[in-house]
């Protein structure tokens, strides 16, 4: 598309009281004056001199360098979405040619990050006495930006809170901020339909409104989240907030009863005293709110959470750690290392395999416990790529060990996230193929977490791995959720008895008897037992009589690097094998 053709006209042809140049300056000044009073962006386009002026606030939002520019069509290229550019120029040309009296177009501009943003641009042309169009003046309105009011609940949204914070009204020690969320609104919706969701929201808002003082303010954050701001409660603000929460809750309960229990729903609350937010910026405040909402979710439905700075700092530490974990992963797994701990035969104490255990080095070089960072990898989904990398590291290590012990087995811990959210069977198959190793060299360890045996996906993956020939170990038996029924359903090849169990069996004759029976019962099912966490001779002696199939523990070797394992535990000569008995 060609550039806009500006009409060849002399300024003195216009019969206006003011010269058009002066008029342009005047219009620009007006646009500038209005800029701070509105969310939308005003503009004036001098069609004769090819100049354009837009509200200065537009520069913060769009990819526009200066509020006043010439060579209008070319400059528009820099901030109009490429695909919409020709359409815009064609439309403006009709205005310049006087074919139309205005401009009303919905198309896309680019924001500061050069991402397309839908806008509606309306304008009206002003003609000179001879009918020649002189100016186009109008308004750019960003579509769908910041709904200030939510009509369904009749509340203002958090955009208004932003203004509230930015005007400094929030800088007081008195009062509190309380988040309220409707528990599981999403599920309510699934059962009873969208209309019901609207009714529940309206009921909750009504109950809150009825319990709030006039000076307290209620805003809607998201469809199921609200925030009450109080800047007046002088006595213990947290206590006042809890009281308010309890009143709202009991009003909701009454309402549900009045409605004949047609829909059951609950709310949760989160409170922060203004003493804790006094110095916070709006952005930090939003982060704190997110933290409070997360804590509310963690605590479960129908509960109230009171903000604690130490817990927020912990939350921030976790965030930093997560970003550290991600950076290290993207940097070729730098700062991650897989350690290996020997597993020995139950009768002779010969090394028979090893368990892979992940390590992460903090920025100060200290090593962090996997108990601390594996849950973060799981929650963020990063355990999928990191877990894949561990499988490759473990198999490459196994290949080296097989030069010393031909049927060496390597165990790898697999998280339920890897099973549920990635194609773990394919990953394992490929890794075995690439390393030219038989499936029998790999044992997958999984911890029973209460719902494993109920999940169809887990059962499917479990049986596919078995068909493939990979060994399966049920980890941490004797802790948490582990129970006999899961063994019957999952039928693993091996059961690993946790150190917790081992310690009890060493100290207490009843536990010793129980452990002996478990081992016997397991053997009668043709399953193998690995006893974990043997640290000394006394513990070894106590469990040896039970004849476990394999043993693991510091007594036989702590987790160590690949090179330490190969050099110190297997010896440098591949023909030589170690005996720890
Ligand atoms: P786990 O799978 O039960 O691993 C055994 C843990 O017991 C390891 O802790 C190991 O160092 C420790 N241990 C071994 N022998 C002894 C002993 O004699 N005494 C004592 N007190 N402890 C012993 P670690 O390496 O800190 O790992 C903790 C947990 O983190 C693991 O428990 C596992 O659940 C998880 N984990 C570690 N690496 C990975 C991994 O690569 N992937 C996944 N998904 N989880 C992993
Ligand atoms: Ca394990
Ligand atoms: Ca274990």
Image (cartoon, grey):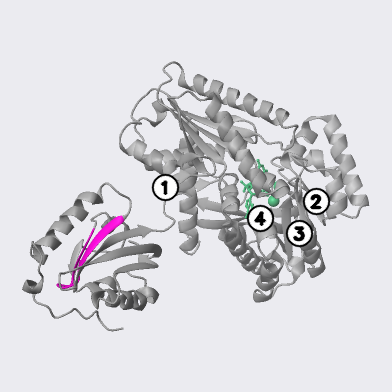
Residue nearest the viewer, comparing 95 with 332: 95
- Residue 417 image label: 4
Asked whether the viewer can see residue 79, the reply is no
Label 2 sits on residue: 454
Residue at point 69%, 44% (across, down): 188
- Earlier sequence position, callout 3 versus callout 4: 4
Residue at position x 71%, y 36% from top?
A: 264
Separation of residues labelled 1 and 2 (CA atoms): 42 Å
Q: CA distance from mark 3 to mark 1?
A: 40 Å
| Residue 214 image offset from top left, x and y in percent | 45, 24
Looking at marks 3 and 1 on the same chain, the residue that comes earlier in the sequence is marked by 1
Q: Which residues are magenta?
A: 41-54
Residue 190: x and y in percent read 70, 49
Q: Residue furthest top?
A: 235
Mark 3 crowdedness (10 Å alpha carbons): few <14, some 14-19, many ≥20: some
Whether tag 2 and tag 3 are in contact, CB under 8 A, the answer is no
Quarter-wise, where is residue 243 in the image?
top right
Q: Of the two numbered discs 4 and 1 on the same chain, state the one appearing first in sequence.
A: 1
Q: Is residue 231 left or right of residue 569?
A: left
Secondary-structure class at tag 2: helix
- State the mark number for residue 457: 3
The residue pinned by badge 1 equals: 364
**Badge 1 element:** loop
């Amino acid at each position: 598309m060609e550039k806009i053709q500006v009409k060849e006209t002399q300024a003195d042809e216009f019969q206006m009281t003011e010269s058009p140049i002066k008029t342009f300056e005047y219009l620009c000044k007006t646009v500038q004056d209005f800029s701070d009073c509105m969310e939308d962006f005003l503009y004036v386009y001098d069609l004769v001199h090819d100049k354009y002026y837009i509200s200065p606030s537009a520069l913060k939002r769009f990819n526009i360098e200066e509020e006043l520019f010439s060579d209008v069509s070319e400059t528009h290229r820099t901030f109009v979405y490429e695909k919409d550019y020709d359409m815009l120029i064609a439309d403006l040309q009709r205005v310049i040619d006087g074919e139309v009296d205005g401009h009303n177009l919905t198309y896309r501009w680019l924001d500061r990050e050069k991402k397309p943003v839908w806008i509606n641009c309306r304008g009206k042309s002003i003609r000179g006495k001879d009918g020649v169009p002189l100016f186009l003046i109008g308004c750019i309105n960003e579509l769908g930006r910041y709904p200030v009011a939510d009509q369904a609940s009749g509340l203002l949204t958090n955009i208004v809170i932003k203004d509230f914070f930015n005007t400094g009204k929030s800088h007081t020690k008195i009062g509190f901020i309380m988040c309220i969320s409707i528990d599981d609104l999403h599920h309510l919706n699934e059962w009873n339909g969208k209309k019901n969701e609207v009714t529940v929201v309206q009921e909750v808002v009504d109950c809150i409104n009825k319990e709030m003082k006039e000076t307290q303010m209620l805003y809607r954050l998201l469809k199921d989240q609200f925030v009450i701001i109080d800047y007046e409660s002088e006595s213990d603000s947290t206590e006042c907030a809890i009281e308010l929460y309890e009143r709202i809750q009991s009003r909701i309960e009454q309402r549900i009863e009045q409605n004949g229990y047609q829909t059951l729903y609950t709310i949760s609350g989160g409170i922060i005293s203004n003493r804790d937010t006094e110095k916070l910026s709006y952005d930090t405040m939003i982060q704190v709110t997110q933290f409070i909402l997360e804590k509310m979710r963690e605590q479960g439905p129908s509960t109230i959470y009171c903000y604690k700075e130490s817990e927020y700092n912990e939350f921030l530490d976790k965030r930093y750690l997560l970003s550290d974990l991600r950076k290290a992963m993207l940097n070729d797994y730098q700062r991650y290392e897989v350690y290996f701990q020997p597993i020995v035969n139950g009768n002779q104490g010969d090394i028979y395999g090893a368990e892979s255990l992940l390590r992460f080095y903090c920025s100060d070089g200290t090593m962090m416990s996997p108990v601390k960072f594996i849950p973060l990898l799981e929650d963020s989904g990063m355990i999928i790529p990191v877990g894949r990398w561990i499988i490759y590291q473990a198999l490459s290590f196994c290949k080296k060990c097989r030069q010393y012990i031909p049927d060496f087995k390597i165990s790898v811990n697999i998280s339920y996230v890897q099973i549920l959210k990635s194609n773990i069977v394919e990953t394992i198959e490929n890794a075995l193929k690439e390393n030219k190793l038989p499936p029998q060299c790999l044992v997958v360890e999984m911890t029973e977490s209460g719902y494993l045996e109920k999940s169809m996906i887990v059962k499917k993956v479990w049986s596919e791995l078995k068909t493939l020939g990979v060994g399966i170990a049920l980890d941490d038996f004797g802790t948490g959720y582990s129970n006999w029924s899961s063994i019957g359903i999952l039928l693993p090849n091996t059961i690993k008895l946790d150190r917790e169990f081992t310690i009890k069996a060493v100290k207490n004759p009843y536990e010793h008897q129980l452990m002996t029976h478990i081992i016997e019962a397991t053997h009668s099912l043709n399953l193998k037992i690995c006893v974990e966490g043997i640290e000394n001779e006394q513990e070894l002696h106590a469990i040896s009589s039970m004849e476990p199939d394999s043993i693991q523990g510091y007594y036989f070797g702590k987790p160590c690097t690949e090179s330490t394992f190969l050099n110190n535990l297997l010896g440098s000569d591949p023909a030589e094998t170690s005996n720890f008995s």
